[in-house]
Image (cartoon, helix red, strand yellow):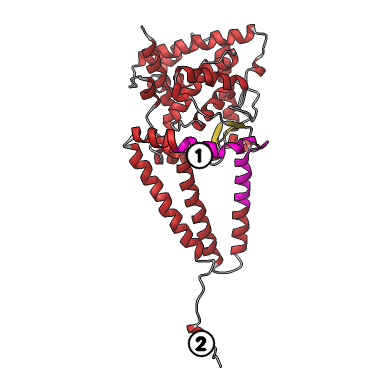
Amino acid sequence: MDQPLPPDSAPKELGWGVRPWLAGLVCLVLAGGSIGTLSVLQRAPDRTEALYCRGVFPVVRTLLAPLGHAPFSVAELMALLLVAAVCVGLLRSMRKPAGVRRALGWMMMLAAAGLFTFEVCWGFNHARQPFAWHAGWEVRPRSQGELAELVRSLGEEAAIERTRCLEAGSVPQEWGLQLQGGPDGDPRLHEAWATAAGAYPVLGGRPVSVRRPVFSWLMSALGISGIYSPFTAEAHVNSQVPLTEVPFVTAHEVAHGRGFAREDEANFIAYLVCRSSHDPSLRYSGSLQALSHARGALGRSGRGLLEEVSADLAPGVLADLQAQYRFWRSKETVLWEWSSRANDVYLKGQGQAAGVRSYGRMVDLLLAQRLAQKP
């Protein structure tokens, strides 16, 4: 007759409180490997272009493409489900002493798995060859005089497009994309992408689904005009931003979706695409946002020169810039600084040493483009 085993000698099962930690450890190894791979790829951009940008990334985009047919943001739904799952898990974990360790294990696993998936689905694009390399341009710091001339040029460009918008019979309230979920968000923008890709083939690729987030109010509170979800291949554009910003912001997020991860390049490509459109309102949006960045760079270089150059800008153009400034000032919250710091840490972690300041470096590309176009 079998005798029961003493309590200390009974076989022990691997409980659910341990398994998430082991799974989390495995995912951390994978995530660490992906970060290490990013570091290696950053030292070999040619290999990144060949193996990832032209190999793995297009396949990932193809696999995620069916999500673009959903009539809602899949990324928002996933975020809501994730938050709900975390909240339920934390509440349930409070019932037992070991519950907190179990919840932390699962959270570590999810975070590590998310980082791994992020890098494989999109993050390695940070290590690709710069856009200027593809275009054959020389990018270097420029003088105050060159910055001032750029502001004047963009100011004249914006004034011309604003006048054309008015001559077409439209009003400022109509100068924006009617955001849709289709390819690149709007047929006009999709056409502009095709035109730009004709001049710069590296811009070609699968169109990106554009979403109007339900939580646009939260994006405004965080100071975010748009965000791209690598997990679902969706570009999200804050529906609260002024219409003069919408085409540029949409093109910026679509640029991310087409594999251009660096913020300065996404900004410049957004300008390039908007300027490739036959619609003056899209061209105006591109010129206006480029002007805003150029004025910011000139202001950091010399405030007096900025005031001198700004005095020559068309009143309507200045009014639109001021309207954008007032909008963002009205949305400013205590969360802005936290959001900016988090974004700065993220960008530096992905190899963009300038962090959030990299957004303004589109000015270097604007100057390089103009220098290349000179006879």
| Residue 53 place in picture, x, y as percent | 43, 34
Percent x, y for residue 98? 54, 68
Q: Is residue 375 magenta?
A: no
* Residue at image mark 1: 60
* Residue bounds of the magenta highlight: 56-84
User: In this orientation, does residue 75 appear?
Assistant: yes
- Residue 1 as seen in the image, left or right of residue 269: right
Image height of 314 relative to 17, above or below: above
Residue that label 2 marks: 6
Which residue is depicted at the point 42% across and 38% down?
124
Query: Which kind of residue does numbered mark 1 sit on?
Result: Val
Towards the viewer: 258 or 238: 258
Q: Nearer the viewer, residue 246 or 211?
A: 211
Position of 94 relative to 266 (above/below): below
Q: Position of residue 26 (x, y in %)?
A: 44, 57
Quarter of the rendering occupied by the N terminus = bottom right
> Is residue 288 visible from the viewing direction of this image?
no
Q: Earlier in the sequence, mark 2 or mark 1?
A: 2
